[in-house]
Image (cartoon, rainbow, N blue to C red):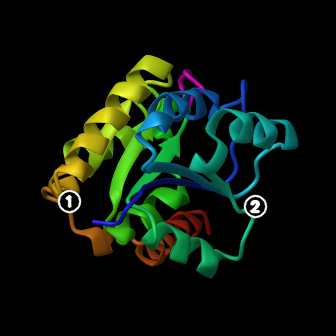
């Protein structure tokens, strides 16, 4: 095992508002900072005020890389132990949310941590196929989830948190999803000619 548990969010987040509110995640990670072996990595847009808050709370336990090209983002995913998805809108859109990032995360074979309602589309898939852990966007729940992940990591059993039960990962690739969408558009367009 590596000497640090790397928990990454790849993509843009907001802090204190919006549908990808990372503030509870930052605060929960601060509660684990005393372990000295957990790092929270943000790859993507993070508001300047949030960067300052994260650094003041987490110190050396946070890495912020800013936006990077897609290929480099994929390398960051592979250099992570846990990949975080956040959707905190808490409205009727929840059940339809399966981001493009989910498909990249899925192919990485890393542990997925979905933050938001259990009804969020990607959280339903994480649970159904045993791809990792899910929790609400509450500090205490995130902390409990992270502590469980941390214990598994310390015991060398992190991989056991992802079973890929009943899922054909290739079926969910962006390429296959794009092909499916293109075929659907063709069928619909063909029916309207």
Q: Residue at x 53, y 39 (%)?
A: 86
Q: Residue 89 lies in magenta, yes or no?
A: yes
Q: CA distance from mark 2 to mark 1?
A: 28 Å
On screen, 186 above or below 20?
Answer: below
Percent of width and height locating residue 122:
40, 45
Res 108 seen here: yes
Q: Considering the image in quadrants, where does the C terminus appear?
A: bottom right
Left or right of 85 on screen, residue 66? right
Q: Nearer the viewer, residue 128 or 46?
A: 46
Q: Nearer the viewer, residue 24 or 136?
A: 24
Left or right of 23 on screen, residue 121? left
Residue bearing the label numbered 2: 66
Q: Which mark, residue 179?
A: none
Percent of width and height locating residue 147:
32, 34
Res 20 seen here: no
Q: Residue at x 76, y 53 (%)?
A: 45
Q: Residue at x 71, y 29 (%)?
A: 18
Image quarter of residue 93 = top right
Q: Considering the image in quadrants, where does the N terminus appear?
A: bottom left
Magenta highlight range: 88-92
Residue bearing the label numbered 1: 159
On screen, 146 above or below 69?
Answer: above
Q: Nearer the viewer, residue 103 or 69?
A: 69
């Amino acid at each position: 095992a590596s000497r640090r548990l790397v928990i990454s969010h790849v993509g843009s987040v907001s802090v204190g508002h919006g549908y990808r509110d990372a503030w509870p995640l930052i605060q929960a990670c601060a509660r684990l900072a005393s372990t000295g072996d957990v790092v929270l990595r943000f790859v993507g847009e993070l508001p300047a005020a949030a960067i300052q808050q994260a650094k003041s709370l987490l110190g050396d336990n946070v890495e912020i890389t800013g936006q990077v090209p897609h290929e480099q983002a994929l390398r960051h995913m592979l250099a992570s132990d846990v990949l975080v998805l956040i959707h905190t809108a808490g409205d009727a859109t929840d059940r339809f949310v399966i981001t493009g990032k989910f498909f990249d995360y899925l192919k990485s074979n890393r542990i997925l941590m979905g933050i938001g309602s259990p009804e969020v589309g990607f959280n339903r898939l994480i649970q159904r196929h045993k791809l990792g852990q899910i929790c609400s966007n509450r500090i205490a729940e995130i902390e409990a989830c992270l502590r469980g992940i941390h214990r598994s990591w310390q015991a060398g059993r992190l991989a056991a948190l992802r079973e890929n039960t009943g899922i054909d990962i290739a079926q969910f690739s962006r390429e296959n999803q794009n092909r499916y969408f293109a075929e659907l558009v063709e069928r619909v367009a063909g029916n309207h000619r």
